[in-house]
Image (tube, rainbow, N blue to C red):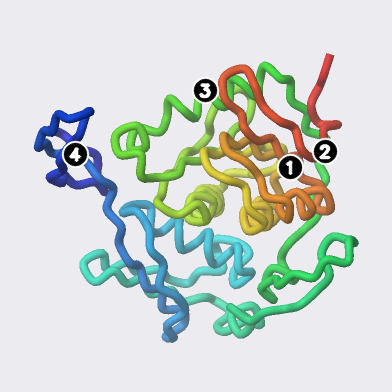
Amino acid sequence: MDIPRGTALHQVIKLNGTEAAAVEEPVVEEVPLTVFLNGKELITMLAAEGEENYLVTGFLASEGIIEKAGDIKSLELDSLQGIVKVETVAGETISEKLFLKRYLTACCGKGRSTFYFANDVLTARTVNSSLQLTPASIVAYSRLLEQQSDVFRLTGGVHGGALAADGKLICFSADIGRHNVFDKIYGRCLLEGISTHDKIIVFTGRVSSEIILKVSKMNIAVIIARSAPTGLALDMAEELGITVIGFARGERCNIYTHSERILLA
């Protein structure tokens, strides 16, 4: 059986009523990836195999450690050891020093306190975009994403996401981690010079507050997701100018925030 990279066959027993059968099923592989930044260990991520350069680049950009691909002096991957060594042009930055430090603030003008990472406070941005979509285009983008995710159809073990515009998917990534999907897309855009302006994100998973923060840092105005958003995610999206569309399945969807971008009849 031919299986995609990053998957492996595993012996399972399948039950169907009272009938049992021993078969081989493909499962997605989960690998640790430790990032060393300017000679210091920064983080160990768990990820699906592949697109490690995109993942690390997008992660560093999301954390405000870099702003553009040219801020990276060198990026070396040792796939056997699961190590990525990154040197930046500027050396240690304030964002690097603040990594994983917490910052307590009131959320979205509602007096509800929440914890942000300090770097999120520095790098989250309000999205200003005149982008508009029709209900038919929402359906079309959702269907394109379903057609793209081969590893999900095979294993059910990954999230998938894509940058999209003009009725087509520009780039697609899949990973075991929701956050990793966005970092891979962001990193690819930075490394390949793909503009995120007036683009949308189509996503298979749940929309949490962390996802909204990543969308805002990518300067993307619209996210279309197959699953549900959280309340805090919607509070953030309202304040950051992001249109959240959830439960986009078949002909149906829910528009939660900034519905002015959807051309309703």
Nearest to viewer (mark 3 / mark 1): 3
Q: Position of residue 30 (x, y in %)?
A: 30, 57
Q: Which residue is mark 3?
A: 143
Residue 258 image label: 2
Q: Which mark sits nearer the N-terminus, 4 or 1?
A: 4
Give the residue drawn at x 66%, y 45%. 229
Residues packed near mark 3 inside 10 Å, few (<14), some (14 to 19) or many (20 plus): some
Answer left or right for 121 relative to 239: left
Q: Position of residue 197 (x, y in %)?
A: 70, 42
Which quarter of the figure has residue 15? top left
Measured Cα–Cα span from mark 2 to mark 1: 9 Å
Q: Which mark sits nearer the N-terminus, 3 or 1?
A: 3
Residues packed near mark 1 inside 10 Å, few (<14), some (14 to 19) or many (20 plus): many
Nearest to viewer (mark 2 / mark 4): 4
Residues packed near mark 4 inside 10 Å, few (<14), some (14 to 19) or many (20 plus): some
Measured Cα–Cα span from mark 2 to mark 4: 43 Å
Q: Which residue is mark 4?
A: 25
Residue 188 visible here:
no
The answer to whether mark 2 and mark 1 are in CB contact below 8 A is: yes
Question: Circle 2 — which element?
Answer: loop
The answer to whether mark 3 and mark 4 are in CB contact below 8 A is: no
Q: Which residue is mark 1?
A: 221
Question: Circle 1 — which element?
Answer: loop
Question: Circle 4 — which element?
Answer: strand
The answer to whether mark 3 and mark 1 are in CB contact below 8 A is: no
Give the residue drawn at x 61%, y 68%. 63
Q: Amino acid at mark 2?
A: His
Q: Which mark sits nearer the N-terminus, 3 or 4?
A: 4
The answer to whether mark 2 and mark 4 are in CB contact below 8 A is: no
Which quarter of the figure has residue 203? top right
Q: Amino acid at mark 1?
A: Ala
